[in-house]
Image: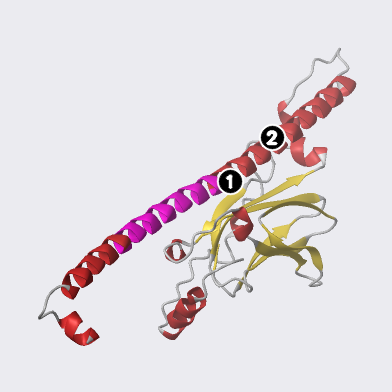
Amino acid sequence: MQVHWFCSIIFILEIIANKMVCVTPPTSALKALPNRDPFSGEMEDLEFRVFIEPYKVECFYQNVYKDHVLEITYQVIEMASRWQWLYVPSDVRDLTIDFKLIDSSSNNVIIEEFAKQEGSHTHEVKQNNSYKICFDNSRSPVSMSINLEVYLYSLEDDDRWGYFEDDFTYPPDIVVDESLETIKASVNKVRDYLIKVEHYQNERQAIERRDRIIAEKNFNYINRFSFLSVLFMIILGVLQIVIIRSLFEEKSFIKRWIK
């Protein structure tokens, strides 16, 4: 990523001045996921924005139950606002970060990506475990803003329908086993598709927001550069006029200095 060299100088000066402020949510943020939705019995979504400081690695922890699926989606949205006056990314290739999903118990790396703009990963959990979600910004001199979404769900019908089985009453003269299983399979299939559609829409919205931010920042950057260029040309033109007029004056300082 092409970044002005003075970004690193600014960062070092901030460290010396002890002005670094960590705005990343605490590591307990992902642990705040409710175990189950009281209506559907499913795990709930968690979506929030995290800021990764330059030359730092931030990790978050998530407990996952056996026979559940951990789904993680992230997109690098923008640089932190304090860097935007120094540098504006020209396109999304400048917004990248390293990602890791680590098994906390064994410290094994399950998923690893380098210099990615976005990512979506699904991991099926075989036993109760804790996982570490890490974003590595150690190679970048600017802080990154990341849209992170974590979703947990079970593939077992008992987890999806256990909350409702006691609510159904069937006429004694009707055999409902096959019909109920068919309805469950159809509803589960529709639900899975709706979950995928929702996640895809959220991902598209995050990407659209990132592209819009880049376009707006580039537009403002061009306007500032154009204004400074015009101002510089005006000052230079006035200075040239003053110098030329001074050459035709007998007592001008510039003429005496040239002689």
Residue 37 seen by the camera: no
Q: Secondary structure at mark 1?
A: helix
The disc labelled 1 sits on which kind of residue? Ala
Give the class, few, some or many, for how many residues have Cα within 10 Å of label 2's Cα (few <14, many ≥20): few
Looking at the image, residue 166 lies above or below residue 30: above
Q: Name the chief secondary structure element in magenta.
A: helix
Whether 248 is among the magenta residues is no
Q: Horizontal placement of 25 versus 69: left or right?
A: left
- Pick the residue in front: 69 or 95: 95
Q: How many marks?
A: 2
The quarter of the rendered structure image containing the C terminus is bottom left
| Residue at x 78% of width, y 70% of height | 105
Which label number is shown at residue 197?
A: 2
Q: Residue at x 77, y 27 (%)?
A: 187
Magenta highlight range: 210-232
Mark 2 or 1: the one toward you: 1
| Image location of residue 181, percent across then percent down | 86, 26
